[in-house]
Amino acid sequence: VGIIFKNGGMGGVVALSRHWAKTPRQGQIATAALGTVLFFDDYSNTLVVGNAMRPVTDRLLISREKLAFLVDATAAPIACVALVTTWVGYEVGLIDAAVKNLDGFDQAPYLIYLQSIAYSFYPLLMMMFVFMIAAGGRDFGPMAAAERRARAGQPESPDTGPVEMAEAKGLEPAADTPRRASNAVLPIVTLVAGVLVGLFVTGSGTSLMEIIGSADPYRALMWASLVATLVAGALTLSQRLLSLEATIMAWCAGIKMMLLAMIVLILAWSLAALTAALHTADFLVLILGDTIPVGLVPATVFIVAAATSFATGTSWGTMGLLFPVVVPLSWAILVANGVADPDHYHIMYSSVACVLSGAVWGDHCSPISDTTILSSMSSRCNHIDHVTTQLPYALSVGTVGLVIGTIPTGYGLPWWVGLIICAACLAILLFVVGEPVPEPAASPSAADETQAGPA
């Protein structure tokens, strides 16, 4: 990630979207699409999309609040459900530590993660909702007022002050570095392909699920990331975009971005060992096992995760706190109710998904969230304006996902039916509550395109 930022590869991907965006609606779709394409890390996604698309959205008279929402709402949701991201190793590591001592449940951690994606209603629905808003040209709540102000010629909030993005400066390419999308696409494709190959090489069995379930995702991710790094470095050096020293420094900057995550993961493993030694899950089963209906376990987990994430402002910290307790608790409740069988494994998958979904939901609503703050900074948007305009959208998607998705699937509704119904409800909500945002009185000048360079 550090290398393909510094060698201009990500700038090339951004440039492709700039050429296509000519209207406010196209600009929003391009921003959302770029946020979805940069799926491998939420921090990187936020910093790149916000800084790169801000000149474009300003020129198209799209409010900074809308840009911050598009950036924030496509960062963590896509990073937490995509198959190859910086989140995957962290999540699988937490799941692995939580399921090691479960009697009667022997599924591989990576397979549990894959099964849980289908029940991650909030991330999936938020990505759908983002494109509904971008393509539909409708908004509601404070966001509608911000968009009307922007269409009148003032995309920036009057309260916005100067903000320095020190995090992004270390990875900004030089002004004379060519922006070639291939320098980002090839390493990413190598990474994805390498992980898939690694899973098949390290796995065994006759079916796809058996192969992936028995595979070693750690080794696959490690080798794939190494090969992708070598490809990125080779492309950079062969085109003389950076010196060997600058390439290594960009690589080190990428490592630095993940240092805090590694510290949190180590502490999470420690917490998992501590809760196991203290029999925390056994205690919770003793006091809650007879009071929480099996079907409501995932919904309860979602609410607890959302509250924890909102209060702490970190989805990763929330996952580290809850996975060691929630996973054994969910399994113990199934055992206590005599339904610890494959027909009810969806409760376990949904509980895992609800830790993740609730953490992201609370993260989106919290004014002290790291990604929320980064979204405001990279978009140069007043932070409180970003929180107040995004909150109604996050609450709407989260409520629909919880009430119409998570709770019914806990009682046996197929996940795909719940997802379709939730998406339909959000579309109806946007059409009924949302109000059309007028197009600019005059089309943005093509001459302004020259201002859409790197921030």
Image: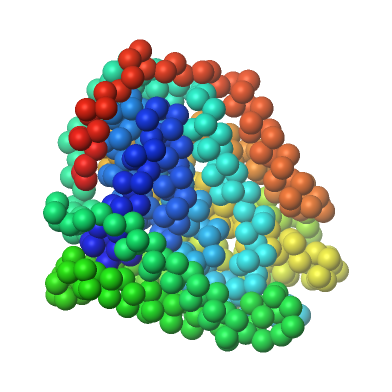
- How far across and how far down the image is residue 339, in percent? 84, 67
Residue 114 visible, this orientation: yes
Say whether residue 149 is left or right of residue 169: right
Q: Nearer the viewer, residue 100 or 61?
A: 61
Quarter of the rendering containing residue 403: top right
Residue 68 visible, this orientation: no
Q: Please tell me which residue is depicted at 56% across the width and 83% down the height of the picture.
A: 216
- How far across and how far down the image is residue 244, in percent? 16, 76
- As drawn, 207 above or below 413: below
Which corner quadrant holds the N terminus?
bottom left
- How far across and how far down the image is residue 250, in percent? 22, 68
Q: Please tell me which residue is depicted at 73% across the width and 70% down the height of the picture.
A: 332
In this view, which residue lies farthest toward the right?
A: 338
Count numbered badges in the picture: 0
- How far across and how far down the image is residue 82, in percent? 53, 60
Q: Please tell me which residue is depicted at 45% across the width and 53% down the height of the picture.
A: 37
Say whether residue 145 is left or right of residue 413: left
Say whether residue 408 is left or right of residue 386: right
In this view, which residue lies farthest toward the top?
A: 441
- As drawn, 30 above or below 349: above
Q: How is the image coloured?
A: rainbow
Q: Nearer the viewer, residue 89 or 245?
A: 245
Q: Nearer the viewer, residue 3 or 374?
A: 3
Which corner quadrant holds the C terminus?
top left
Q: Please tell me which residue is depicted at 69% across the width and 39% down the height of the picture.
A: 422
